Amino acid sequence: MPEPPDLATAEEYAAFFEVEHELGVLFRRAHALSAHIGRRVHPELEPGAYGLLVRIDRVAPVRPSDLAAYVGVGKATISRQVKVLDELGLVGREPDPLDRRAHLLVLTEEGRQRLGRARSARRRQLHALLAAWPEEDVRLLARMLRRFNALTETMPTASRQA
């Protein structure tokens, strides 16, 4: 594998290659875990929809266009996904007080309860995975992930999807 010209040393390249590999493993496993947790919310929930529910819960009420921008998909994609969430009784719509033509998304009580149960199960699973680690290591992991996530917030949408 040729060394990219912008990396100074073979050691630096190896370090970035290792990070890339580990992130790939993490992302694949996280996707599988989201699919599993999503099915705990509702058996018919698509894998990507779990993340939408989490985001809606965090920032509701939210415009579908803002949700689309956050996850880096088009409005048509969000519309289809929100329609399914609505049909499953997990999200509701309320009028946007600033624009009567638009609506805002909120979790329904059913959606909130189902998401809460799924999150509790996910937290128990994560605790079981990390229980053997010293608390300092768990906090370090959280800080490093926060730093990494902050970096990805500044990336153009197309780069986040790559």
Image (spheres, rainbow, N blue to C red):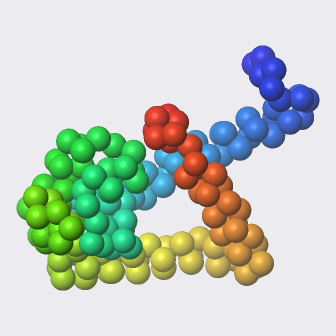
On the image, the x and y values in percent for residue 26 come to: 57, 51
The answer to whether residue 109 is seen in the rendering is: yes
At 12% from the left edge and 70% from the top edge, which residue is drawn? Answer: 95
> Horizontal placement of 152 versus 4: left or right?
left
Foreground residue among 51 and 78: 78
Q: Which residue is drawn at 59% across and 57% down?
A: 149
Residue 98 located left or right of residue 87: right
Q: In which quarter of the image is residue 34?
A: bottom left
Tell me where residue 115 appears, x and y as whole percent. Answer: 30, 75
Left or right, 22 with respect to 127, comes to right
The answer, for residue 50, to whether it is visible in the render is no
* Residue that sits furthest to the top in the current view: 2
Percent across and percent down for residue 48 are 33, 52
**Which residue: 66% across, 69% down?**
142
Q: How many marks?
A: 0
Q: Is residue 80 above or below residue 131?
A: above
Where is residue 64 shown, x and y percent of the image? 24, 56
**Quadrant (top left, top right, bottom left, bottom right) of the N terminus:** top right
Compared with residue 56, is residue 71 higher up or lower down, i.e. above or below? Answer: above
> Residue 41: which quarter of the image?
bottom left
